Every structure is written in C-alpha cells, then in structure tokens.
Image (cartoon, grey):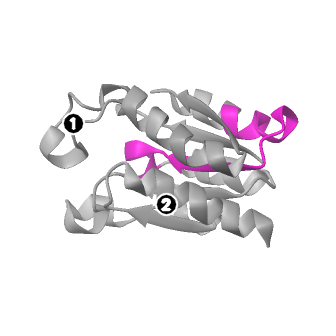
Amino acid sequence: MHILILNGPNLNLLGQREPQIYGTNTLNQMEESIKKVAQPLNVQVDFFQSNSEGAIIDTIHAAKDKGIDGIVLNAGAYTHYSYAILDAIHAVTTPVVEVHLSPIYQREAFRHHSVIAPACIGQISGFGIDSYRLGLLALLNDLEK
C-alpha cells in the first residue's frame, strides 16, 4: 500500500501555533510517528503540506497517477468552506479519510461543519497526532475490504 498524508494551511506551524489546541509536536514529529505505524505494516507513506488550496487540489488529482492508494487529509480551515477540495475528492477514485488534531465539534461553531466530509470515507478528530494514526489504520482497513 502507498498512502499520502496531505496537510493543509498552517499545519507547517505545528508545535508553535496554539499548542494548547494543536499540541506541541511539530509536523516532522507527526510524520515520524506515522512512519512508525506504517513501517511494520509494509505501508509506504508520503507527506505533503501546503498553505495553498490549489496545491492541495493538484495533489489530490495527481495521487492515483503517482500510485497512491489512499489519502489521509487534514485540510485545516479549508475543511469548512472549500467546495473546490470537495469537488477534487469527488473527481478521483482515491479514498480519503478526513482527520483533525483538535476536537472540531467542541470548538467554534464554524468548525462544526465540514464541507469535504460527504466525499470522504470517514472522519476522525480530537485525538491530536493519534488522529493521523487512527486515520491511517481506518484507511488501510477500508482498502483491504
């Protein structure tokens, strides 16, 4: 299996940005944590982060051609208003699991709604970097069906 972990805006600032909400782990530490889960499962994991909506969309579109079997996506704030990312997920056959570090349903009201959720096979939020590990395992389980 070949999985892409795709991160959206401001996730490059993990460990610095609002650590009381997003934790103290950096993006690199989160990636290393995911690699530790993926390696014994013989899963190849690639990582991409962008603050640009267009780059995220281009990455979703190109995933299948790059041999990606599934995507774990934290679209950041784009989760709540990017119909373009929703359309990109709908446009491809690559399954996507939506993840969030913080418990989005316990935060500001605008964060309670995900416009991308209808195109995803599932959503995991509120477990810090474990959301990514759980998302990866859920995606692998779905792909094995």
x and y percentages locating residue 100 in the rendered image: 39, 53
User: Which region shows up in magenta?
Assistant: 59-81
* Residue 124 on the magenta span: no
The structure residue drawn at horizontal position 49% and vertical position 60%, both measured from the top left corner, is 134
Look at label 2 and name its amino acid: Leu
Q: Which dot marks residue 134?
A: 2
Image quarter (top left, top right, bottom left or bottom right) of the C terminus: bottom right
Look at label 1 and name its amino acid: Thr
x and y percentages locating residue 51 in the rendered image: 45, 27
The structure residue drawn at horizontal position 28% and vertical position 62%, both measured from the top left corner, is 103
Rendering quarter of residue 64: top right
Disc 1 designates what residue? 24
* Relative vertical location of residue 8 with respect to residue 96 in this rendering, above or below: above
x and y percentages locating residue 89 in the rendered image: 68, 52
The structure residue drawn at horizontal position 61% and vertical position 46%, both measured from the top left corner, is 38
Question: Which numbered disc, 1 or 2, marks the residue that appears first in the sequence?
Answer: 1
